[in-house]
Amino acid sequence: MTRRASVAADYRTEGVPNSTDEKKVSVPVRAYRVTGRVQGVGFRWFTSRAAKELGVSGTVYNHSDGSVRVHVRGALTLLNQLETILARGPVAGKVEAVERVEPSQTVKADGFRIERTP
């Protein structure tokens, strides 16, 4: 399995209102492109379950190129844990690479969802 990080910044942040005051708190956001045997093997459900257990928000969907895309937001330690879990993948899958990519969408802070292929 190969893990490639983007040459750009390790992560970007999005401002989220802080309930204790009116300032916005920066929350790290990452996106991943996962390749290998990752479609038709329960990878999206595997990812959703892991993300919910970690308490990160975001989405996962099958991409038309055969990869799975994951967009997440949360504490860096949790994003790092999720990246490790993605690299392992479900039993029926075979992850070849987890590549950090530039997020192509805003990640909402209201839980984790499996989305349809765009």
Image (cartoon, grey):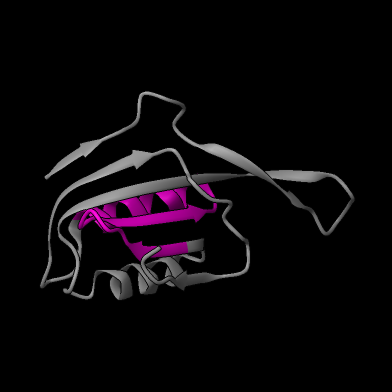
Which quarter of the figure is the N terminus placed in?
A: top left
Depth check: give the residue in front, 21 or 105: 105
Which percent across, then down, holds residue 27?
A: 62, 46
Is 62 drawn above or below residue 78 in the view shown?
below
Based on the picture, tell me whether residue 26 belongs to the magenta stretch. Answer: no
Depth check: give the residue in front, 9 or 56: 9
Q: Residue at x 34, y 55 (%)?
A: 69
Total numbered badges shown on the rendered structure = 0
Q: Residue at x 12, y 66 (%)?
A: 93
Based on the picture, tell me whether residue 73 belongs to the magenta stretch. Answer: yes
Give the magenta part as a residue range.
59-87
Is 47 drawn above or below residue 12 in the view shown?
below
Q: Residue furthest right?
A: 22
Q: Residue at x 48, y 55 (%)?
A: 72
Which quarter of the figure is the C terminus placed in?
A: bottom left
Question: In the image, 30: left or right of 106?
Answer: left
Question: In the image, 57: left or right of 39?
Answer: right
Question: In the image, 15: left or right of 97?
Answer: right
Give residue 19's quadrant in the image: bottom right
Is 15 drawn above or below residue 43 in the view shown?
above
Give residue 25's quadrant in the image: top right
Which percent across, then down, holds residue 41?
A: 16, 74
Which percent across, then down, holds residue 10?
A: 44, 32
Q: Residue at x 30, y 58 (%)?
A: 63
Q: Residue furthest top?
A: 7
Which percent across, then down, holds residue 26?
A: 67, 42
